[in-house]
Amino acid sequence: MNDRHPLNDRLLRWALALYPASYGAGARAEVADHAERHIARAGRLAGLHEVAGVAGHGARVRFGLTSHRALGRALAIAAPLAAVLAGTTALRLAWQSVRTATDPDFFALADAGAQKDGPLVAMAALVAGPVLMAGAVLIGRWSAARRLALVTVLATPLIHYLGRPDLLGMSADIQASFYLSHADLALLVLNAALLLLAPPDRTHPRSTGPWVVAALVVAATAVITLAVPFGENNALTGFDLLAPVATGAAIACAARTVGRAALSTALLSAPLLLTYGLVGGGPMQVSLLERVTVLYAFGFVIAFGAVRLAELLARRSRPSRS
């Protein structure tokens, strides 16, 4: 048995203080006993991990982010969709970078090999976390998805800073083509943060909503990419058109009740609204928010109506008990 580490014991006491009084002295004592026994057998790093787990659970209980609270249930619905939106956004940005790098005009601007390869390497490092996170969500690997969400939240801004165009020696024209905007960076990080906040025991989606959102967005982006010549009408993407509709429909199918759907909608809209508030914007951003709102409402209303109609028909088809 390893020696106990006084620092871990002190941190554990602070972690236990995060639990609200309503949690109950008995339940808190049970958590403390389990953590103390684990810390006594573990090394220093494993003990710190246990303390972090206790602190995280205590914070969830205090702020109502557990699976039996309304906010926790709404997060469990919204978080997988937010992760998929972050992943499809990153995939779209990566595809745009690849198309730019393979365009003949780009090679005329990029003289050195570093100017040709550096932007793609930087973009690949930026989008790897969100794309892998979305993939882990879709295949149900929730522990891996949460770790990748943490990597996205912490590492993506750092990679964004280290991959600044001036550090890579790129010209102004290449900078404009490759450098990830602050708005895109904020959306990736904030959507990933929703997955970290969701209760770990109820994150798994009970529907195929995340798969449908991902498939529709990728398919629409591919169709529009093939139909619209490169460089023309770049603002028109499958993500802009179908992501709000598909997300609204997925929320309607998963939430079932208006109250839970409204709370899940508010959580999903938080990254977009926070990005608008942090980055700022003019008429273009306002029109984007209006378009997203209308498309989301359209998808939600249609799907919610279909769900209610299916439930009504199912009730009427049941044989009545005499």
Image (cartoon, rainbow, N blue to C red):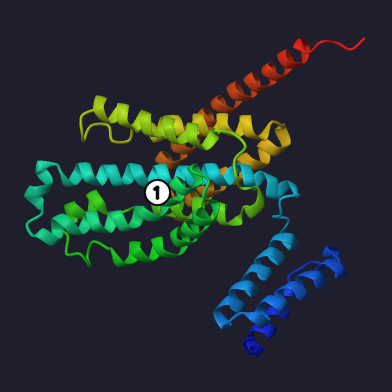
Q: Nearer the viewer, residue 128 or 297?
A: 128
Which residue is farthest right? 322
Examine the image and state in which quarter residue 158 appears. bottom left
- Residue shown at the point (56%, 29%) measured from the top left: 249
Report the label total. 1
Q: Is residue 14 visible?
A: no
In-front residue for pair 187/309? 309
**Amino acid on which the number 1 mark rests in the picture:** Val
* Secondary structure type for disc 1: helix
Figure quadrant of residue 170: bottom left
Give the x, y percent position of residue 265. Answer: 61, 39
- Identified at 70% across, 38% down, the residue is 260
Residue 268 visible within the image: yes
Of residues 84 and 45, which is closer to you in this image? 45
Mark 1: few, some, or many residues within 10 Å (few <14, many ≥20)? many
In this view, 240 is above or below 71: above
In the rendered image, the vertical position of residue 321 relative to residue 130, given as above or below: above
Residue located 39% across and 60% down the image: 156
Q: Position of residue 140 (x, y in %)?
A: 53, 45
| Rendered location of residue 131, percent (x, y) | 40, 49
Q: Quadrant of residue 217?
A: top left
- Residue bearing the label numbered 1: 131
Q: Quadrant of the N terminus?
A: bottom right
Q: Specify whether 203 is left or right of 271.
A: right
Picture quarter with the C terminus: top right
Identity of the residue furthest to the front in this view:
1
Q: Is residue 225 above or below residue 149?
A: above
Residue 251 pos. (x, y %): 60, 34
